[in-house]
Image: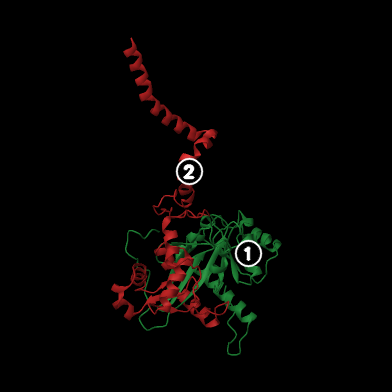
């Protein structure tokens, strides 16, 4: 995590010169200790980096510095996907804008033992029309039917995919990100169908 | 007889200044210290003007690798210095998102020797494309400072900015999502 000793680490295949580069990002949110960093660490090649930021509303108060962990993976030679841990600030809505603006979508990790911890994040994404998936951190396994009842009780959009996810397993994380992107694609298409855009295929879950 | 008394008096006189100094010191700790304020007054403003960040250790905080902390990082002196680089500005003229990629171009690489230190640092860092967030993290700068620094460098043509596909809009376009999807499937 600390790169002071090493010279700047090589993070992955850099785009060849002249090739157009672009980037996308995904936000990973959820309660404390639910596995957000683990989730990201499972998919990126290197260890996570940490940047500091000031929530815009509080800029000037040095004591309000916040740490944001993130990782990056090159999806093709010109496309870098960033995964950011949504910071748990005192007021979760206070400074998320920088992290969330322009994101493909969000993964809300959901600890089946502590469902209430993820409600703030879900509400934020619902209010801001940011597509998200609920990823049940199902380390304890086989409680999914109960959890689904809880989720329906919380009144979230039935279109939101609910997937099982073990943040320690790369394949599981990858599947979660794929279902997020498919959901985001559908959501985007539903919201603003452009003239030259064709109907995306239904997600295969 | 009288010489013995003189010697005693001399000793008393010699001790007096030391006793007064000690009394001064003690007065400094008591509520009565206002009596001596005129002597200590010049020190007071200097002490009050000391920046708040002084007591904080300047050693960069090592962080535990796994633990997710919501505790804000302690400010260190380099943050104050960093804001001095930006002339106190917290906004950049160029629209940079945290995931926006920047890279040094060939021309900059050749002229790296004549750049100011922090620009040189960024150029070295951006030999491979880096996001704004990475530059902030690797240079241990607050995000706002990194944005201003990179914005300045982009305006002077020192780094190329590769706009994100969502730049200008709120959500990425379908083409980018398709690319993300096929990239994820290849992972």
Establish if A9 lies above or below B94. above
User: Mark 2, chain letter?
Assistant: B
Establish if A127 lies above or below B165. above
Identify the chain drawn in green. A
Q: Are marks 1 and 2 on the same chain?
A: no
Which mark is on residue A155? Answer: none
Residues tagged 1 and 2 counted as in contact (Cβ below 8 A): no
**Side of A170 where A103 appears, left or right:** right
Distance from the alpha carbon under mark 1 to that under mark 2:
57 Å
Residue B187 is at least partly visible in this image:
no
Task: Give percent across and percent down for residue A108.
Answer: 58, 64
Task: Give percent across and percent down for residue B148.
Answer: 46, 70
**According to the image, what is the colour scheme of the structure?**
by chain
Disc 1: which residue? A122
| Snapshot quadrant of residue A120 | bottom right
Direction front: furthest residue:
B2
Q: Quadrant of the C terminus of chain A?
A: bottom right
SS class of the residue under badge 2? Answer: loop
Closest to the observer: B140 or B92? B92
Identify the chain drawn in red. B
Disc 2: which residue? B41
Closest to the observer: A138 or B103? B103
Task: Give percent across and percent down for residue B114.
Answer: 30, 73
Residue B33 is at least partly visible in this image:
yes
Foreground label between 1 and 2: 2
SS class of the residue under badge 1? Answer: helix
Q: Quadrant of the N terminus of chain A?
A: bottom left
Residue sitting at x 45%, y 63%: B83
Residue sitting at x 35%, y 59%: A4
Residue sitting at x 42%, y 83%: A20
Task: Give percent across and percent down for residue B133.
Answer: 45, 68
């Amino acid at each position: 995590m600390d790169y002071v000793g090493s010279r700047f680490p090589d993070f992955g295949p850099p785009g060849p010169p002249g090739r157009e580069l672009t980037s996308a990002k995904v936000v990973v949110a959820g309660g404390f200790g639910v596995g957000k960093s683990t989730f990201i660490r499972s998919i990126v090649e290197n260890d996570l980096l940490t940047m500091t930021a000031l929530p815009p509303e509080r800029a000037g108060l040095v004591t309000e510095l916040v740490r944001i962990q993130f990782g990056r993976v090159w999806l093709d030679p010109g496309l870098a996907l960033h995964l950011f841990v949504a910071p748990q600030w005192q007021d979760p809505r206070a400074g998320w804008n920088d992290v969330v603006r322009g994101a493909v979508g969000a993964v809300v990790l959901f600890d089946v033992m502590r469902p209430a911890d993820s409600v703030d994040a879900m509400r934020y994404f619902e209010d801001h029309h940011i597509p998200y998936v609920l990823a049940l951190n199902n380390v304890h396994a086989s409680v999914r039917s109960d959890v689904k009842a809880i989720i329906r009780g919380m009144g979230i959009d039935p279109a939101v995919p609910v997937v099982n996810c073990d943040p320690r397993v790369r394949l599981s994380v990858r599947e979660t990100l794929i279902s997020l992107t498919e959901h985001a694609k559908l959501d985007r298409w539903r919201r603003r169908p452009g003239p030259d855009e064709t109907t995306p295929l239904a997600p295969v879950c | 007889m009288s010489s013995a008394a003189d010697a005693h008096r001399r000793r008393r006189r010699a001790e007096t200044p030391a006793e007064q100094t000690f009394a001064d010191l003690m007065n400094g700790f008591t509520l009565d210290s206002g009596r001596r304020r005129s002597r200590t007054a010049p020190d007071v403003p200097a002490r009050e003007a000391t920046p708040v960040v002084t007591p904080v250790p300047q050693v960069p905080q090592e962080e535990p690798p796994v633990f997710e902390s919501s505790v804000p990082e302690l400010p260190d002196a380099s943050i104050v210095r960093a804001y001095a680089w930006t002339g106190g500005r917290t906004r950049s003229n160029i629209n940079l998102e945290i995931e926006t990629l920047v890279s040094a171009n060939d021309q900059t690489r050749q002229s790296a020797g004549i750049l100011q230190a922090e620009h040189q640092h960024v150029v070295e860092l951006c030999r491979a494309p880096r996001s704004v967030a990475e530059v902030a993290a690797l240079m241990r700068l607050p995000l706002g400072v990194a944005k201003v620094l990179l914005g300045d460098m982009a305006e002077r043509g020192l780094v190329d900015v590769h706009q994100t596909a969502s730049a200008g809009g709120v959500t990425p376009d379908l083409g980018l999502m398709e690319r993300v999807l096929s990239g994820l499937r290849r992972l």
